[in-house]
Every structure is written in C-alpha cells, then in structure tokens.
Amino acid sequence: MSKRPVVLVVMDGVGISENKLGNAVLNAYTPTLDELLSTCPHTAIAAHGLAVGLPSNGDMGNSEVGHNALGCGQIYSQGAKLVNESIASGDIFESETWKNLVSYCKEKGTLHFIGLLSDGNVHSHIEHLEALIKQAKAEGVKEVRIHALLDGRDVPETSALLYVERIEKFMAELNDDSFHACIASGGGRMKITMDRYEANWPMVEAGWHTHVLGEGRTFASAKEAIETYRAESGVVDQDMPAFVIVKDGKPAGTIEDGDSVILFNFRGDRAQEICRAFDEEEFTHFDRVRRPKVQFAGMLQYDADLNIPHQYLALPPKIKHTLSEALVKQGIRQYAISETQKYGHVTYFWNGNRSGKFDEALEEYVEIKSDVVPFEQRPWMKSAEITDALVEAIKSGKYDFLRTNYPNGDMVGHTGDYEATIIGVESVDLNLKRVMKAVDEVNGILIVTADHGNADEMYEKPKKEGAALKAKTSHTLNKVPFIIYGADVEIAEGEFGLANVAATVAKLLEVDGDEAWLPAIIK
Ligand SMILES: O=C(O)[C@H](O)COP(=O)(O)O
Ligand SMILES: [Mn+2]
Ligand SMILES: [Mn+2]
C-alpha cells in the first residue's frame, strides 16, 4: 500500500468539446484546469453509450451509469437496456409483480402509470410505457390513467407537447368499448414527485396531492395545461406547475382503493421518495391525507438494501466487485463527500446502487445540505463548503482514498442558463485549486474527471443555419477529462472510459485491483 493518499474529484457535467459556441467549460475562466491540463498526464475518456452500459452510442451519459462505472470498474447493462430486453422477451409480463398488479385492478379498478414522459432514456422511456399499456389492455385491464411528469431536462427544454401528443394518439388507438386510457394529472419533474436524496420532500407531497388526491389547478387536457402555463409565464417543461385533468367536472383519475400503480421510471434516485410514500405503513415525511389500498410497483428495484420499492417489474444490474469493497478488504480508509443533490452519486451510485457502507469503521460519508433554490441564482452552490470539509479531511491524515462530486457544471447546466453555468464551472475551478494545495501538503495524488458532459454544450444544435439559439438543458455525448496530478505516471495506449478509472485508483494506491475490472488508464 502506498503512503500517498489519493483524492478523486468528479466535476459533474463537465465534458470536453472543441466547439466554442455555448461552451461553458471552454469559455469559463479556469486557471486551475488549464494548469492541470498543461502540466499533468491527462486524456479524454468516454462517458456515454456503450462505454457505460446504455443501449446505444446515441444515448448520452448520466450520473447513475457514470458513477456506477467509475465505482465498479466494469460495464454493466443498465436499467434502460435491461427493461428493453425484459419487454422484448416478455419476461416483465411473466413477473409475479405484473400479474399481481393486473389481477388486483382488472375487474373494478384502474391501472395508473406515474413517470417521466419522454424518450430521454435517463430515468424512463416512453416506449416502455406504451408497451405496458398495450399489454395491460391485452390482459383485460379496463381503465388506465397516466400521471405525466414533464421532462425538458433530458430532452429539449420545451418538448413536452411532443410526448403528450404521442401518448394520447397511442391511447386513442387502443381506446374502445372495453378499454379506456387517458392522462389524469401531471406537472414539471422539478416541481413535483421526482425529488432526490430527500432534498425537498414538499415536491413529493405536491405530487401526491396531484396524482393521488386529484387536487390542484384543473384543465380539460394536458395540452391545455401546458399551453396555458407557457402563455402565462413562459415556464419551461421541467418547472411547469402541477395540473389535474377534469372530465365531467371530476378529476379524470384519482388513485383509489382497489387500483394498481406503476412508477415507470427505471432510475432510482428520483424514484425512491414517491415509492416510500406509497409503500410505507409508518410514514412521517408529509401527511398523505388519504392512503389508498393499492398494489404499487416500480419499474425496477431501486435499492435492494432498503427494499425500495416493495414490488418491482424488473431487476437492476447486480453490480459486484466494486472499488469500495475491494479497498475496504485491503484496509483502505475512505471518505466520500458532496452536497445533497449529488450525495447519493458518490455513495449510492458509486457503490453500485447500495446505500449502505461496506465497512462502518473504514468509511466516512459526508453530506453538505443543498439549498432549495433555482441553481442559476446560486451557481456556486455548496462548492466552497464541500471544499472546506474535504480539505480538512485530506489534511487530517485519516483517509487513504477520498472522493467528491462538484455538482455545478451539471445542476446549473440543466437550467439552460449559459452565463450562470460559466460561473458554476468557475466555482469548481476555484475550489479545485484549494484541493490541489491540500493534496500538495500531504504529498498526495489528485485525479480530476467527470461523469458525463452538460456544461460543454449550452445551446441545442441549430436546425438551420442562422436559426435563433435555443437553450440546451440536457447532458451531452462528449468525452470527459481524466487528469492525474502529483504522480509521475504515463497514460497508457488505447481508448478508455469511466470503467477504466477504478483500476487506475487501485494502481495509484498501490493495492490489488479486481480481475473483473477494465485495465488502468496509466502504464
Ligand atoms: O435527474 C436529473 O437531474 C437528470 O435527469 C440527469 O442528471 P444526472 O444524471 O446528472 O443526475
Ligand atoms: Mn452527473
Ligand atoms: Mn445531470
């Protein structure tokens, strides 16, 4: 084992592109990154598509698959791909859960689908929803209701109508005397239901009131809701207020005793809280007012240790041989820190979607509370506070491997605000300098990388030359930097991705790697 501590920094959403237009990484003032890139061994590594276990290279990377790959050194088929396969093979419809939900609601109840209505393939895919609705009808379900969370964060900023129209056309073609499906409620994904890491439970409470109780501002259709809210305030999809659809003066689909409910998102971070609201007998995070007796299931098992949700349609990848586990077996003391918005990324996602530790004595996890504010108004977020704690941990000499995630490039990038995102990236750069200094003081080694791009492309590619620029809120397909500071090493020949980082960390710590891992990026 080396005596030199290794610190790994994930700059969330900081990808590499040579294209200067709307590039909040290239156009930010980043003296630290510039210094690292001009003086240290570095390369660019793949963070999207097949390199992180997604169905195709047209799929952008995301935090879940990115941190999974970083933390386990392997490429596993991810939720997006596993659900595709399970639908194609029909396995999903053979599952006990599917059968249970269908039989529970088929005679007198309604089958509800709650989830992110888009083809972003980060949390969900509209094709999965369509396949489930079609099969529900084939198996004799009579009533289906959709509770549509509008995206605009993994897909273009104002694309909600495209998906609403698509699903409504799909349902209209299925609807007949024996079957009726329609949208019952919805709202922007950053306003209701899809909170993560317990950053903002009131979002989930608002979702409960909308989907379950059918309370809120009413409209005749989802289209009317979207067009009205846009006309009133110019609000973009992800921030759209909640809406309830009414038919004949009543909500089109509250959730009642005898119904079944499927959360059709496959990704876990933003799925867990609403699952808990349905599943938990003793629930204290908000007053549910009424808890219907339903059969509830998630698309995937989101956390096996915590048993969330109790029922699920498909199994997630069984991620084994993680870096954390290999390191604790060799006595390596570890420290992980981020702010709430990304805390689970460096713990839960990093450890293959496990929320527990491998070894209480050897691992310390620290969460700095995120503010609940529009991040374009505070683009520095908690970068300074994360750094205060990280620097102290580095200097304490108590840890051999320390990791952090700075959310700024990603969280501010998702707002589509170019100028604010530049400040977000600059905040990361400023704090990176402090981390470098602390690493110097303990004669350590620093790795700087990212999980996927976002801030590197803040405008959609114009459809025609000269067309007005449109903010881009989603991730990118670009590679990410991989830099090693403080070690006299050479980058190996070849193409690398995020799954090559675990072996590199082990090599720098001078401990054994795992045979399952992809090779290190250094010679
Ligand atoms: O959940 C989100 O905020 C986005 O869909 C994806 O962003 P992340 O993968 O960086 O968390
Ligand atoms: Mn990310
Ligand atoms: Mn993101």
Image (spheres, rainbow, N blue to C red):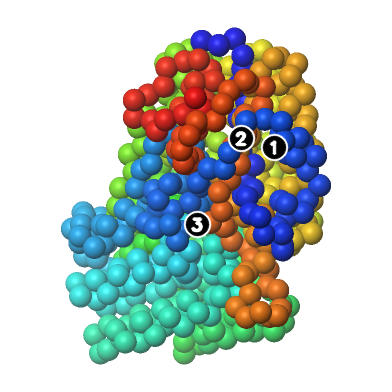
User: In this rendering, would 101 be left or right of 388?
Assistant: left
Tell me where residue 45 appears, x and y as whole percent: 53, 43
Tell me where residue 204 appears, x and y as whole percent: 56, 57
Name the front one of labels 3 and 1: 1
Question: Dot 1 lies on which element?
Answer: helix
Give the residue drawn at x 55%, y 11%. 2
Name the front one of labels 2 and 3: 2
Task: Give the mark, 3 or 1, whose residue is nearer the N terminus.
Answer: 1
Real-space CA distance between mark 2 and mark 3, rounded to the nearest whole angstrom = 22 Å
Mark 2 — residue?
42
Mark 1 — residue?
37
Tell me if residue 295 comes above or below residue 434 in the rendering.
below
Q: Residues within 10 Å of mark 3 (few under 14, many from 20)?
A: many
Q: Give the amino acid at mark 2.
A: His
Mark 3 — residue?
60
Real-space CA distance between mark 2 and mark 1, rounded to the nearest whole angstrom = 7 Å
User: In this rendering, would 284 be left or right of 425?
Assistant: left
